Structures are given as C-alpha cells and as structure tokens.
Image (spheres, rainbow, N blue to C red):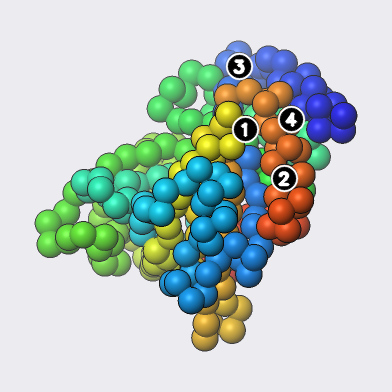
Amino acid sequence: MGYISSAMFDMSCLLAQHVSGASNMVPDYEVKFLMNATAVLDPTNSYKLKPFVLSAFSMPTSVTKMHVQFLDTNSKQIYNAGWSPRIRKTEGESGFELTYKKRYPVSGSDINAALTTANSEGFDSTDTDWDAQIEWGYSQKTLSISRKKSATKSGYSGMDLPNTSDSRSMLIDKAPGTFEDWGGVNNWGTDLLDVSRIYGPVLAKRSIGTWSGLEVYIEVWPIKDVAGTGIEYIVEASFKTGSVSVAGTKSGDLQTYLEGQGWFLAGDSLKTGLIMDRY
C-alpha cells in the first residue's frame, strides 16, 4: 500500500501551477534501479548478463551498443550549474545524438515544486522542443529537462565518437538558446563548451525485454573505478511510463521482484555523476 499511497501523493502534487502565466511542463517517468553486478553478470563471458536474467525478462542475447561522452570544463562549471551536454553514438543509427539536459532535484515526493522551479527558469508547457522526465530512483527523484539534436561529421565510422575539437564544434553549433544564454548571460554555455574537454567515453550495452506488461531495459555501463585503475560495472534496470500511478505501483513491484531474486542493489543510479567524477 505504501507504493500506491506514494503514487497518489505524487499525482496530487502535479495539479497545474502557473508561473508567469504559463503552466508547468508535464513529465513522463523513468523508473531506474541498480542491479547487483556480481549476481547478474558473467565475468567469464565478457561481463554479459547471465542467461537466467535474460530469461526472466524475455530478453534476446543480442544487445545494442551505446558510446557516450560528456563535455565540460576542467572545473565542471556546466555540470555544477545542473547541465549535462552529451554526445551519443548508438549502434545501428547514423550520425551522433546530441543532448542538452538540465536537472532539478526533487525534494521528497514534491515533483510539482521541481517543475515550478524549472518554470521560473524558463521551462514551461509552451516549450514543446524540450522534454520533461522524472528519473525515479531507489531513494531519490530528479526532474530532467532535455532537448535532443543530431549531427554528422565525416571521418568517423562504426561506434567512433568525435574528438574534442569536433565535439566542441557540434555542441556549440547546435546549442539551443536556453542553454547558450543560461542565467541571462550571453553565450554562457557556448563559451564554456569552447574550453571544454571530454568526460568519458563509456561504451554501454542495452538489452530490451518485457516484465509485468512493461518494456524493460537493462543497461551495463563499464565505468572507471574510484582508483582509476580498473572497471566498475554499473547495471541498471529501468522502464518508462507516462503515468505517475504506474510509476509508483510498478516501481514497488519491480523492486520487490529484484529483491526476491537476489539481484537488487540498494542505491540510486547516478551514472553521469560517476563519469564526471572519474574521467
């Protein structure tokens, strides 16, 4: 019942609010849980998901590769302002996907307060180019507002990511005005990108399956360990929904299932933060 009550509370928090005459954005929800890498990955088979995990979620043995890197200054001025400019190359897709993401912490279950804060900073329901999402974790929720662009560049093939110079040029050229002039400072974002460096890259793998009527993703992210001498495998199970009540109910169900299998890892999935800290 606790999960349903939480969902109902979250729903009540999403009643329309207005800041400067425009209503708040309406988010969708991505529930994310960490899985115990030791329990679900096979170190004798390139750290792939074990067969019984694939079977539990009706997943094929094939995966989709995603090569990811972020750009920021040495002092992480962009990240510290809540922004994350990212470049991703996904297997089977042409070109590069550029994402400009702004994050807002959610205090407890007060999703609407985060949406109202975002509204006061220029992200409201009239911004149809931007997508709002609640990242719903084990103990934390985060509002992310993102805009995606695409770019191409000759000289790269396969899963290659662009070098620093080309990465800067892509992200500067495609930068949306909100990011570029953040905080009312002309060229804030693009000036910082002009002196940025790469954080990463990380080559992740995604498996897609189903569970309890939902499409479920399991991603494996090999990220440098704290010492910088080895690899820590971050395994994340997730699903997306447009319904706060489904997010609330099914998040509890999924956690209970993963705990019952011995696969659950208590903690919040903060992949971007780990990459920014360790690269």
Q: Amino acid at mark 1?
A: Ser
User: How crowded is the residue under tag 3: few (<14 C-alpha within 10 Å), some, or many (20+)?
Assistant: some
Q: Residue at x 16, y 54 (%)?
A: 153
Q: Could you say whether the residue bearing mark 4 is in a helix, strand or loop?
A: helix
Q: Amino acid at mark 4?
A: Thr
Q: Could you say whether the residue bearing mark 2 is in a helix, strand or loop?
A: helix
**Residue highlighted by disc 4:** 249
Q: Amino acid at mark 3?
A: Ser
**Residue highlighted by disc 2:** 257
Mark 3 vs mark 1: give the one in front.
1
Q: Amino acid at mark 2?
A: Tyr
Percent x, y of residue 59: 47, 46
**Residue highlighted by disc 1:** 212
Horizontal relation, residue 139 to residue 236: left or right: right
4 or 2: tag closer to the N-terminus? 4
2 or 1: tag closer to the N-terminus? 1
Q: Which of 170 and 7 lies nearest the eye of the viewer? A: 7
**Residue highlighted by disc 3:** 23
Viewport quadrant of the N terminus: top right
